[in-house]
Amino acid sequence: MRELRYNPLTGQWVMVSAVRKKRPWRPEGYCPFCPGAEETGYGWDVLVLPNRYPVLDLSADNPENPEDKGFYKKARAVGKCGIIVETPEHNVEDLDELSLEQMKRVVEAWMRITEQSSKDKRIAYLMIFRNKGKEIGVSLTHPHGQFYALPFIPLKVRLKIDNSRKYYRNNGKCLFCRILEEELASNERIIYENQDYVLFMPFFANWPFESHIYPKRHVQFLTQLNRREIENLADVIRVTTATLNTLFGRQMPYIMGIFQAPFNERTEFYHLHIEFYPILRDASKIKYAAGIETTTWEFTYDGLPEENAERLREACRT
Ligand code: UDP
Ligand code: ZN
Ligand code: ZN
């Protein structure tokens, strides 16, 4: 059984599925993503697999009569959940341990997933993300990312689209390009820069060491990247993770998300970007999204973003 349930109070969809409960929790002595496992086989560098416990399914036929609605709205949980196994090596802790070549292959896998999802009219939005660290709650430690090809545009993404559309209408300019311009001019929160990308802590950071990657070229999708931009994206992701893992001299648990434009709307004003939400505020202290964050979705920031950006810059130099 799987279905989408609409929350009329917030305008969000909840993805309901009984299969999710069956997923293994940190199995010992067996890894489903290692070479030679049931679904993996041998002779690969990067592997894209369907999630075995998907909350969305392209053949979803529940609820049986989505049109036959009472007060509450339901929809079919049509979509796809997948896994990107980023290396055959089980013990790699983070993307900074991959070679540049290997990281490029991961970026190319993201591009292929984007290409495929964009061709399916039922898919409205693709979210590629990565959970890292046991503090985040990963159930399998083999290096992997995930993707959800969604039949709707998530609320947070809709807000970003609406606000950047408004900015574009009022100013004839991309809001993300404008943010980049501002960051480069002030140079207060820039952590790293290569020919094609800027890594910085946003002025409005929520997490103590939140870090964003913006491509310098105004593009909406990973599939628009050229050879050099693919290589430089691999570079900036390795640098970002290395920086976060150097900051406290320990592995940094984080969530990463790749924000591309939606598929079925004209959004040339939108701009591809990647966000990292590292959850540590200190070597042994976690910043929890607790009371105010969870009740209101608004964050408090302990300290000054500019000071933490300086610490990240220092870690990056190291
Ligand atoms: N999974 C899978 N095949 C398996 C075992 C697990 O596809 O044989 C999926 C599982 O459903 C889960 C993901 O692998 O979604 C592991 O993801 P992670 O630990 O990052 O976080 P989770 O999704 O469990 O919160
Ligand atoms: Zn493994
Ligand atoms: Zn732009």
Image (cartoon, rainbow, N blue to C red):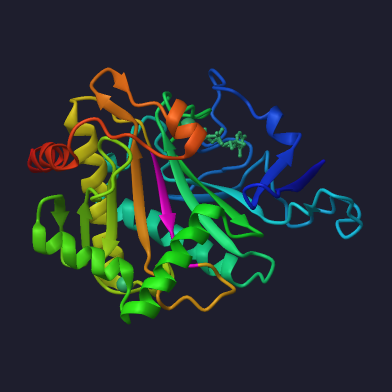
Q: Residue 113 location in percent, x, y?
A: 52, 61
Q: Residue 208 location in percent, x, y?
A: 26, 35
Q: Residue 12 location in percent, x, y?
A: 63, 50
- Using the image, determine if residue 164 lies above or below residue 129: below
- Who's the residue at 9% across and 56% down the image? 187
Farthest-out residue, bottom: 172
Q: Which range is magenta?
A: 255-261
Question: Does residue 220 appear anywhere in the picture?
Answer: no
- For the image, the number of numbered tags is 0
Q: Quadrant of the N terminus?
A: top right
Q: Quadrant of ligand 3?
A: bottom left
Left or right of 4 in this view: 150: left
- Who's the residue at 76% across and 34% down the image? 18
Magenta highlight: main SS: strand
Let me know if residue 33 is in the magenta part.
no
Splitting the image into 4 quarters, where does residue 107 fall?
bottom left
Q: Residue 290 location in percent, x, y?
A: 45, 26
Q: Quadrant of the C terminus?
A: top left
